[in-house]
Amino acid sequence: MSELSDLSRRNDVHVMKPEGTEALIRALIEDGYEVIGPKVIAQAMLYEPYEAGETPPAGWTDEQDGGRYRLIARDDGKLFDYVVGPQGFKRYLFPPREKLWSAKRTADGFAVGRDGAPAKAYAFFGARACEVAAIGIQDRVFDNGEFSDPTYNARRAKAFIVSVDCSRSASTCFCASMGTGPAPEAGYDIRLSEIFEDGHHMLLVRSGSEAGAAILEKLDLKKAKKADLEKADANSRRAAEMQTRVMPDDAREVLARNMKHSHWVEVGKRCLGCGSCTMVCPTCFCAAMEDVTGLDPDSAERWRQWDTCFSVNHSFIHGGAIRQEAWSRYRQWITHKLSFWHEQFGQSGCVGCGRCITWCPVAIDIVEETRTIRDSEKTEALHG
Amino acid sequence: MNVHPGTAKPVEDPMLPLTYEVVGIKKELPDTVTLDLRAPNGMPFEFEPGQFNMLYAFGVGEIPISISGDTSDPMQLVHTIRVVGKVSQAFAKLKEGDSIGVRGPYGVGWPVNNIKGSDVVIVGGGLGLAPLRPAIYSVLANRGQFGNVVILYGARTPNDLLFEEQLHEWRGRFDLHLDVIVDRAEAGWPGRVGVVTQLIDHAVFDPEETAALVCGPEIMMRYAVQALADRGVDTKNVYVSMERNMHCALGFCGHCQFGGTFVCRDGPVFAYDTISELFTTREA
Ligand SMILES: Cc1cc2nc3c(=O)[nH]c(=O)nc-3n(C[C@H](O)[C@H](O)[C@H](O)COP(=O)(O)OP(=O)(O)OC[C@H]3O[C@@H](n4cnc5c(N)ncnc54)[C@H](O)[C@@H]3O)c2cc1C
Ligand code: SF4
Ligand code: SF4
């Protein structure tokens, strides 16, 4: 590959037919990636492994609202007209349960070492802008300048991201107000934008890295026209305009100064403490360690699994849990996401994917709760 | 880059404990032991007063435990542990020659070097004296660089006094003032009965030139800070050591998130002013 063609591929925008996804997925698999992309499973859009020859499911859209998710089949052949399902790509980079190390008793004590399989190289196909942003957020968590998490970072270093712009939003989406979507600005290796207009159906293709450009070399692409670019831009503009939920831009300050607001207790009456919001959130990173011994008493293992700040145990110290009440656990979660995350990582911990709204069984709404506190701040101060 | 600060060696993997050998065991109280540990390769363990380690009991679990030894004796890593649950129980059963996993040291400790020139008031409650002991050693080793040194210690009963021999030794010194109080006592206890804040009211120090180091149950620390403030100590010179659940000590597990901090990395010792808002917020 000459340097020149490399560069031209990098900067040019191309188009391919929708069927071109087959060749793209195949090229990634041939390059040694395990490709993970959307599949319809159990009436939900999940991210699962693809085999060579597979293509993303066509003709699906979704309806989402507080506590409600429906996948709807259509016959229009659109590839990406649904938004995000219950699970992001988090489970691949930061697995729900993972062995960290094993220990074995030796003559003079015990020895500890990693013995997990080498990190897989994943290609995440169809990652929405909010997913790309969420991966960026977890990157900061697992490499905080002082310590870096070996297994997360080994997988992350090998990961390849094929992003997709959203051309439609669900009622739960609010990425525009979080500044993360509907189209990604960076963080992808290849970026796709779907255009579906006047009988034309095609995908705009851009590379965002050397690795992305190298894959594009293998595909049958045409140069995009200016009009195609404009159509793609109009699509993401429309997706942004569809968003009815808007996170107040002073959420950080509002929550930080209202830790004693009476509304927390009100939310606490509704919250079940089920932790569903934290399981679906693509940025939540709490994990619990579990130490086990097997049948052989001379060997031991440490496992790490997702935890949730909605469990009472999460704040357990000798003498009892710090956060006994549902309201204080909800407050812990939302203030961390929207406020304290900034102090720790220099950005918000929320990308506006709306999953926590959709998958909350009682439709507690991160945007709505923030707004309620914000709007009642003054009266609260009078009464409080 | 991950660095194992205890050995100043770059480590590939901050999650792997190193194996230390138990070389000394002292039963301090019926439910509390002090373990002396030595690195297998004889490496010194450098730390700051107030820092802690993650200690691993083979196959049982790993818990945060403060270092209770002397920074000037880095060949001996010392921990004082109260038995409360399964991991601490496993530590209490260890014998000399047994192994224990160590990761650390972690966190920000007592600002002993930044408070030189001031009077120092050290307030401990119960087991809280253990994380304070390295600070006491350090202050006493550089005694000339501090003003009045006052140690105020509260325990439940006379039978719960930690480091009793040392308390006697410190009480015998002319260059520091030690006062002890217990919640309740049988007849015959010659000392005071009450709460540790009462000692603050009577201690001799110049509030305007005082730094205070406070460690104990959260409720005790709350009252102690109040009593110090009532005496006129500026709360920006009051330091408290926070306890939160911790599973990793690296900032990855989320359990010790406390407002905009992780107690494991930004604490456990905090200048009171930086956390006063949350410290007085219920269930934060
Ligand atoms: C910074 C710091 C310094 C500490 N220093 C000391 C010390 O010097 N001496 C001492 O005796 N104790 C100290 N503690 C408290 C000590 O960590 C707990 O008593 C210990 O974790 C209890 O574990 P266990 O398994 O014996 O008890 P259990 O009650 O059976 O605990 C079960 C599990 O709960 C979790 N857990 C319970 N309490 C805590 C806790 N405080 N932090 C994290 N996880 C917890 C652990 O995962 C533990 O395995 C310190 C705590 C912190 C945060
Ligand atoms: S907090 Fe809710 S909306 Fe924000 S990233 Fe997490 S799941 Fe998505
Ligand atoms: S906010 Fe909703 S999803 Fe989250 S713990 Fe409460 S009830 Fe469950």
Image (cartoon, helix red, strand yellow):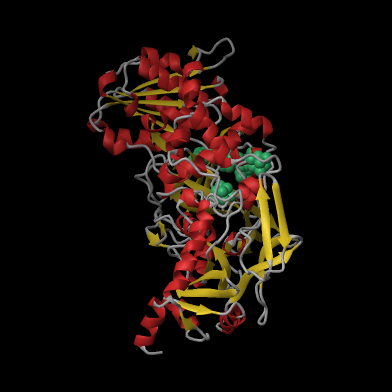
Q: Residue furthest bottom?
A: A2
Task: Specify the farthest residue to the front.
Answer: A198
Screen quadrant of the N terminus of chain A: bottom left
| Residue beneath the point at 34% across and 86% down | A4
Q: Position of residue B208 (x, y in %)?
A: 26, 20
Furthest-top residue in this view: B187
Residue A347 at what x, y percent from top left?
42, 49
- Dividing the picture into quarters, in which one does residue A227 lie? bottom left
Residue A200 picture location, percent across and down: 57, 75
- Front one among B257 and A86: A86
Q: Is residue A10 left or right of residue A269?
A: left
In the image shown, does A166 or B246 lie closer to the viewer? A166
Q: How many marks?
A: 0
A107 or B271: which is nearer to us? B271
Q: Does residue B75 appear left or right of residue A290 in this picture?
A: left
Looking at the image, residue B271 sits to the left or right of residue A266; the answer is: left
Q: Quadrant of residue B121?
A: top left
- In the picture, residue A73 is in which quadrant? bottom right
**Residue B154 seen anywhere in this rendered image of the structure:** no
- Kindly identify the residue that appears in the image at 47 percent across and 77 percent down: A212
Provide residue A207's location: percent of width, then percent of height: 45, 75
- The answer to which of A83 and A218 lies nearer the viewer is A83
Tell me if residue A99 can be seen.
yes
Residue A243 to residue A328: above or below: below
Residue visible at 46% across and 64% down?
Answer: A233
Q: Residue at x 51, y 38 (%)?
A: A335
